[in-house]
Image: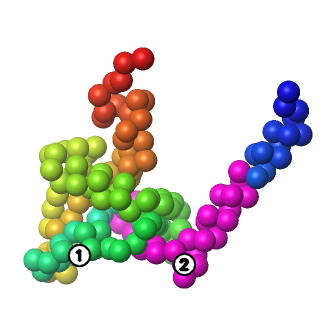
Amino acid sequence: MTTNHNKFDLDLQYGQEGERWLAWLGTDQAKVEVKTERDQWATTGNAVFEFTSRGKPSGIAVTQADYWVHNFHLNGRTMLTFVFPIQDLKDFLRTCYRTKGYAGSRITNGGDDHTSELVIVPISSLHLIATSSLPCNRLTKPTST
């Protein structure tokens, strides 16, 4: 029989494990790519991922990171942050690239002199990166129970 005290101990241990993982992300041992969107996202509601620049792979296509941290700043303050395992993010963006309109995404040119290819994704769809394989996801085929 589990007591409330034992459950608290387990919850505390689980929380401390999460804190250690987050601290590890800030070390030289972790390979993390950080992208920071400034201000414009608050008007468009979109996140931008570059995958080519001047005809060569770049951004998400070439990162060697284990995790991708995507910050959203507004007026100099971090308002929202997503942390993605890099392979999950790449798989999601490949689906966006290959499937027109997937999760509200679109492909466009932008950046300096419009020489970069970008995947534009509604911020409201970014949770799908973590949940795309779950039965509750509306974009996946339902699983039978």
- Residue at 35% x, 66% y is 40
Q: Where is residue 88 shown, x and y percent of the image?
A: 37, 54
Residue displayed at 38% across by 62% down: 86
User: What's the mark number on residue 58?
Assistant: 1
Q: Could one spot residue 91 in this view of the protein?
A: yes
Q: Split into 4 quadrants, where in the image is the C terminus?
A: top left
Return the residue nearer the eye: 41 or 84.
Answer: 84
Q: Mark 2 points at which residue?
A: 29
Looking at this view, is 125 or 39 the one in front? 125
In-image side of 17 versus 107 (left or right)? right
Q: Residues within 10 Å of mark 1 (few under 14, many from 20)?
A: some
Whole-percent x and y of residue 22?
61, 65
Residue drawn at the location 43% of the way across and 68% of the way down: 66
Magenta segment? 14-42
Q: In the visual, does 96 lie left or right of 39?
A: left
Residue sitting nearer the eye, 85 or 100: 85
| Magenta span contains residue 144 | no
Name the secondary structure under disc 1: loop
Camera-side mark, 2 or 1: 2
Count of numbered badges drawn on the protein: 2
Q: How crowded is mark 2: few (under 14 residues within 10 Å), some or many (20 or more)?
A: few
Residue placed furthest toward the top = 145
The percent coordinates of residue 110 (x first, y second) are 18, 71
* Residues at marks 2 and 1, CA–CA distance in whole angstroms: 23 Å
